[in-house]
Image: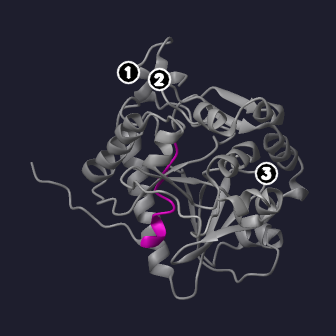
């Protein structure tokens, strides 16, 4: 049997092919965070409980959920908010919906198209494996490739951007949601240098620190230097810090290994520099496929973890 060709991911796709510790394609129990919960816990104990060890229970900020629901129910409040950028596009989130739009940078049409193709290959590969194999892994769902001739899309959405943008090429997908404020506060209290802790509220109020995803580095063991820039957007969590928080690093490595195996052997992608990230659960989880249901039963643990 011949092997599938292995294709390298483009730099800008790395932000799309990212993984969350919260199960995709599965029903997940959601616990809403009350700010008082943090006050009753130390930051290390709080983070130990929040991030999954033996179970994959997901957490959502109650205040964030209320804001999301209010915006969802009131379409005039929806707007695109810039949350980052990659090699070939600027990333915008749509408030009230779990969606992101990557808008092409100048002369990057084919790079963005390649992103879309690779994203679709990865998504189909994950859909074709068993629910147990992909358990604990969440891949952003592919939405739509937009081009300048999609008049209806641009007419409906152009007014949602804070400033005018050209009708161009864009890639729509689901979002890996940022971590809620109680988690961000605990990261600062547990891991930030003293000068950041001294100005915690100002630090947390900065826009770039509100879009917080944690990148897990299981191969990096080092102390965080006080002089090193500290930020919550794309926060690097090393294995030594995971051990300090008493997280189950063996479990994380097992999940990551399964994700990389699916990308390599099923999708034919080399997964070069793919990022494993921790984020909040989306408001609506993807249901199991019909094939998943045939492999499970009404009491299956995979339906609820």
Residue shown at 50% from the left, 11% from the top: 299
- Element assignment for label 1: helix
**Along the line of sight, the residue nearer the viewer: 246 or 109:** 246
Residue 96 — which label? 3
Q: Is residue 138 visible?
A: no
Say if the magenta span includes residue 165: no
First reached walking from the N terminus: tag 2 or tag 3: 3
Against 10, is 48 above or below?
A: above
Q: Position of residue 185 (x, y in %)?
A: 73, 48
Q: Is residue 46 above or below residue 54?
A: below
**Residues at badges 2 and 3 in contact (C-beta under 8 Å)?**
no
Residue furthest to the left: 1
Residue 127 figure quarter: top left
Q: CA distance from mark 1 to mark 2?
A: 10 Å
Q: Residues within 10 Å of mark 3 (few under 14, many from 20)?
A: many
Give the Cα distance between marks 3 and 1: 34 Å
Q: Residues within 10 Å of mark 1 (few under 14, many from 20)?
A: few
Label 2, residues with CA under 10 Å away: few <14, some 14-19, many ≥20: some
Residue annotated with mark 1 = 295
Q: Nearer the viewer, mark 3 or mark 1?
A: 3
Residue 160 in percent (x, y) is at: 81, 68
Residue lying farthest to the bottom in this orientation: 107
Q: Which mark is residue 98?
A: none
Q: Is residue 163 left or right of residue 254?
A: right
Q: Residue drawn at (56%, 52%), measured in percent from left and top?
A: 214
Q: Is residue 190 visible?
A: yes
Q: How is the image coloured?
A: one colour
Residue 89 located left or right of residue 11: right
* Residue plotted at (63% across, 62% down): 233
- Span highlighted in magenta in the image: 11-20
Q: Which residue in the structure is indicated by mark 2?
A: 302
- Sequence-first tag of 3 and 1: 3
């Amino acid at each position: 049997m011949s092997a599938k060709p292995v294709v390298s991911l483009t730099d800008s796709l790395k932000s799309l092919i990212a993984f969350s510790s919260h199960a995709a394609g599965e029903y997940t129990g959601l616990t809403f965070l009350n700010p008082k919960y943090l006050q009753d816990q130390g930051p290390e104990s709080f983070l130990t409980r929040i991030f999954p060890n033996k179970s994959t229970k997901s957490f959502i900020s109650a205040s964030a959920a209320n804001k999301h629901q209010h915006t969802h129910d009131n379409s005039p409040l929806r707007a695109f908010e810039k949350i980052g950028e990659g090699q070939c596009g600027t990333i915008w989130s749509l408030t009230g919906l779990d969606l992101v739009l990557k808008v092409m940078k100048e002369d990057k049409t084919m790079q963005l198209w390649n992103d879309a193709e690779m994203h679709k290959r990865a998504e189909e590969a994950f859909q074709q494996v068993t629910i147990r194999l992909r358990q604990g892994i969440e891949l952003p769902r592919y939405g739509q490739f937009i081009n300048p001739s999609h008049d209806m899309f641009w007419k409906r959405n152009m007014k949602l951007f804070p400033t005018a943008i050209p009708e161009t090429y864009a890639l729509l997908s689901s979002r890996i949601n940022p971590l809620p404020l109680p988690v961000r506060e605990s990261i600062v209290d547990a891991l930030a240098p003293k000068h950041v802790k001294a100005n915690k509220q100002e630090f947390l109020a900065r826009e770039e620190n509100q879009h917080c995803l944690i990148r897990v580095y299981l191969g990096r063991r080092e102390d965080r230097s006080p002089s090193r820039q500290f930020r919550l957007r794309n926060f690097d969590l090393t294995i030594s810090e995971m051990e300090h928080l008493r997280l189950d690093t063996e479990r994380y490595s097992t999940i990551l290994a399964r994700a990389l195996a699916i990308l390599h052997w099923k999708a034919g992608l080399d997964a070069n520099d793919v990022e494993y990230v921790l984020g909040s659960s989306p408001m609506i989880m993807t249901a199991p496929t019909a094939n998943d249901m045939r492999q499970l039963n009404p009491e299956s643990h995979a339906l609820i973890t």
